[in-house]
Amino acid sequence: MEYKKIHLDLLKISKKNNHSSFLNFLKSCPPKQLKVFNGELSVYLSKAIVGQQLSTKAAKTIWERAEKFIINQPLQNRNLENNLRWRYTCS
């Protein structure tokens, strides 16, 4: 139910600050409940970037490969760009 409160707060703030376009947009949309991600931030951000840049099918394929690599590497030893480049040029 927190998402409903957030929606109401946004309505109040946009009205108070005379943001009529945003207010009208919010009024036209029902509150949306977002999925909560409780995992590692770097994994989430990596997946979001891949998903935004590529088609769904390509993103799924790349993500399946990258996720295995990301999860198995200690955070302090990650150099994703170099390691992924090496891994996929040697495959």
Image (spheres, rainbow, N blue to C red):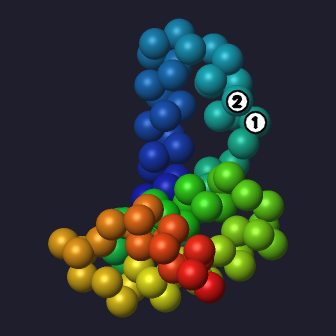
Q: Which residue is mark 2?
A: 25
Q: Is residue 76 left or right of residue 37?
A: left
Which residue is found at the position 70% from the left and 24% from the top?
A: 24
* SS at badge 1: helix
Residue at the location (23% across, 75% down)?
Answer: 77
- For the residues labelled 2 and 1, the Cα–Cα distance comes to 5 Å
In the current view of this chain or complex, which residue is farthest to the left?
76
Placement of 37 over or under 16, stated as above or below: below
Looking at the picture, how far across and down is residue 36, in whole percent?
Answer: 46, 70
Using the rendered view, name the quadrant where residue 90 is placed. Answer: bottom right
**Which residue is denoted by mark 1 in the rendering?**
28
User: Does residue 67 sit above or below 12 in this rendering?
Assistant: below
Kind of residue sitting beneath label 2: Phe
Tell me: 77 left or right of 68: left
Residue reaching furthest to the top: 18
Task: Confirm or deny contact between disc 2 and disc 1 (CB under 8 A).
Answer: yes
Which of 80 and 20 lies nearest the eye of the viewer? 80
Q: Quadrant of residue 76?
A: bottom left
Residue 74 in sight in this render: yes
Q: Secondary structure at mark 2?
A: helix
- Could you say where residue 72 lies in the image, as x and y percent from the top left? 36, 89
List x then y, in percent, for residue 86. 48, 73
Amino acid beneath label 1: Ser
Q: Residue at x 61, y 61 (%)?
A: 50
Q: Residue furthest front?
A: 90
Mark 2 neighbour density, 10 Å: few (under 14) some (14–19) many (20 or more):
few
Percent position of residue 40, x then y: 34, 74
* Residue 58 tag number: none
Q: Is residue 21 left or right of residue 80?
A: right
Residue shown at 67% from the left, 17% from the top: 21
